[in-house]
Amino acid sequence: MSSSRQQGATARQIMTQTFALLSAIILGGALIAGMVMPVVTAAGTTVNAGTALFEGVPEDLGFTEPSEQSVILASDGSVLARFYAENRIVVASDQISDHMKNAAVSIEDRRFYEHHGVDVQGILGALVSNITGSTLSGGSSITQQYVRNALIEQGRVSGDDSEINEATEKSIGRKINEARYAVSIEKTMSKDEILTGYLNLAQFGRSEYGVEAAAQRYFSKNAADLSITEAATLAGITQSPARWDPIRHPEDAQKRRNTVLGTMLENDYITQEEYDKAIDTPLEDTLKVSDPQNGCESAGNSAYFCEYVVQDILQDDSWGEDRDDRVSQLYRGGLTIHSTMDPSAQKAAYNSIVEEIPVGDGSGTKMALSSVEPNTGHIKAMAQNTTYGNDAEDPYATTVNLNAGVDMKGGSGRQSGSTFKVFTLIEWLRQGHTAYETINSNSGTIPRSQFYSSCAPEQLADYKFTNLEGKGGGNMTVLESARQSVNGSFVHMASKLDMCNIGNIAQDLGVQRGDGEDWAYVPAQVLGANNISPLSLSVAAASIAAEGNACKPMSFTSIEDDDEEIVKKEPDCEQVLDKEVARETTSVLKQVVSNGATGESAQVPGREVAGKTGTSNNDYDAWFMGYTPQLATAIWHGHTEGQTSMIGSTINGRYYYEVYGGLFPAQVFSAYLPQALEGQSNESFTAPSRNVTKGPSTSRPSNSSSNSSNDGGGSSDSGDNGGGSDDDGGDSEDDDD
């Protein structure tokens, strides 16, 4: 068949199909009622089958719910961050201004309230365009556009490009298909429902979908509050979102807006006076642009907590089919995620950090702070003195959360120094000992035969350790050893305990290695050899504050979808430590934050505080963990680039020969805590039933079956684990594993 004959046949097919379609539409009232009426074409053929165009189209087309932005809220309901693949906020009809509805109808489909889904004049225009070979354009009713946008959205959500191509191809076949769906939809949806659906789906800019997101983007207001002029601007965009973008092309957008205003006047939606006033208003005078916010980068100094929430919900297998499904839900599902972050505590955390060590400080040192609520595990604050992002030119820009471990897109953890002595103290008290007892505080080497490990004897080794000059020597009470953080005392205490019990109670209370590696039950763990994350240390502190009730950290409490709760999280807690032992531990750690002790600068006037300082070898890392009955906090200070000493550093413009836990971390804690607990009562710790800090004291029987004597132990092929000094001058061991 020749090309001209093929074209003629195609044209005849188009005319036949279109005439059949138009015939069915003309008989729309009867068709919608389910009546079949034959129509005779000019060629003499009946189009009883013309109405068959609408057969097989389900009344409920089952369109996919449109993509909608999700939002993470702080504990007070304020917005922390938004996430979207398409910037859309679905709203109800009564949340859209009548001016907006009128503007859309005027410019897109002025006979919208008269037809049954398809505008006959529009179809005829499309027919002429196709037969003459011009580009198919115009002619689509709002109902048809709603269908097309719904089909496109369905393809986007499913990731099926073929669906998108079918919905956007320039052909009469696509027009006919749209018309079939449009007529079917008008049987089951009201005009207002269709118009609302259209306004929620339509594209109003390069990345704005739906009228609510557009209103917030261009005018910083809700769609319900749009004026005549603003509504006309938005209604004009949908024909060509890039061309009529009011930010990038204000002159063109104003001309288009004025065209819309003209149609509104012509269709009696506005008065001549309203038209004149709107026309005389420069478009740029009406704009109040809000930058779109997408992802944690827009969360400011809460960005790292935001990232933690994202990782938390993506790893939560209590909802969603799998991780990919949860990602899709986050970016398309319109979720409302209620987080645990307290904005006041978060602000106080960040400000307290950067006042001591500003972002970009010449020292290059970083600081991270995490706060957890006892008895719930709710993360109340998470801050660090870096900029969230991936700017290669900014050495302080990073997406790595220094408070978390690698499993939560965080760092690999740092040696905890003398803060880990807390867990040797706990095991010491758990075995019935007191803090009034005296212990050998000398530095030196303890052979591996004098250590005991019930779970990992192969990790034992001879252990050489040192005290800071002028500290330790001879026998000291455990209490004074804790106050002055004397290494020798705690290593000798550990030699009378089970290494596995020390490591296990730390983990039971919440401590985790940041790098995800197995726990090292080596003697050096006593002085903080395992790399741990600040968050996990704050969780452990919260467990002690809660008298042994260990709660897993929680970053969010619920996830809602269209006001329906799909995830509800309750505190996941377990009593892992006897209350009396926890109270005894606190009674000792209160003394660490007293005058003359290493944690003196962490004192908070008017509040009862317990805590522990820590510094690793060569001042690589400095720590403070502290708590009240209401809040537990861990603070780390150091370099993120390997093992870099802070000895002789100039920090925030001041030179420091030594940098230790009792310096910046303790000072930050003292500044932060009053702000974080502002308005809350000053609660006191419950005193233990026996006084372990003053003797003589009756012994409490051990509540562990572990060997607490010097004997036992096991062989090890490992060598010396390194030496250390005490808290105020670098008190942790190098981690050789």
Image: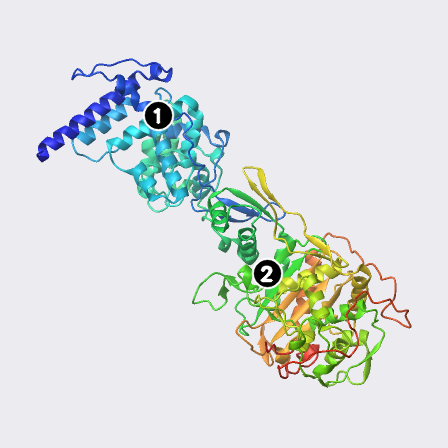
On the image, the x and y values in percent for residue 345 come to: 65, 56
**Residue 485 versus residue 304 in the image, above or below:** below
Secondary structure beneath dot 2 equals strand
Query: Would residue 106 be seen by someone viewing this image from the given angle?
Result: no
- 154 or 2, which lies in front? 2
Tell me if 51 is positioned left or right of 347 in this view: left
Which mark identifies residue 575? Answer: none
**Residue 199 versus residue 713 in the image, above or below:** above
Question: Which residue is at a point 35% across and 37% down the rendered structure image?
Answer: 238
Q: Amino acid at mark 2?
A: Ala
On the image, the x and y values in percent for residue 257 come to: 34, 35
- The CA distance from mark 2 to mark 1 is 58 Å
Which mark identifies residue 56? Answer: 1
Q: Mark 2 or 1, which is nearer the eye?
A: 1
Question: Which residue is at a point 44% across and 30% down the rendered structure image?
Answer: 196
Quadrant (top left, top right, bottom left, bottom right) of the N terminus: top left
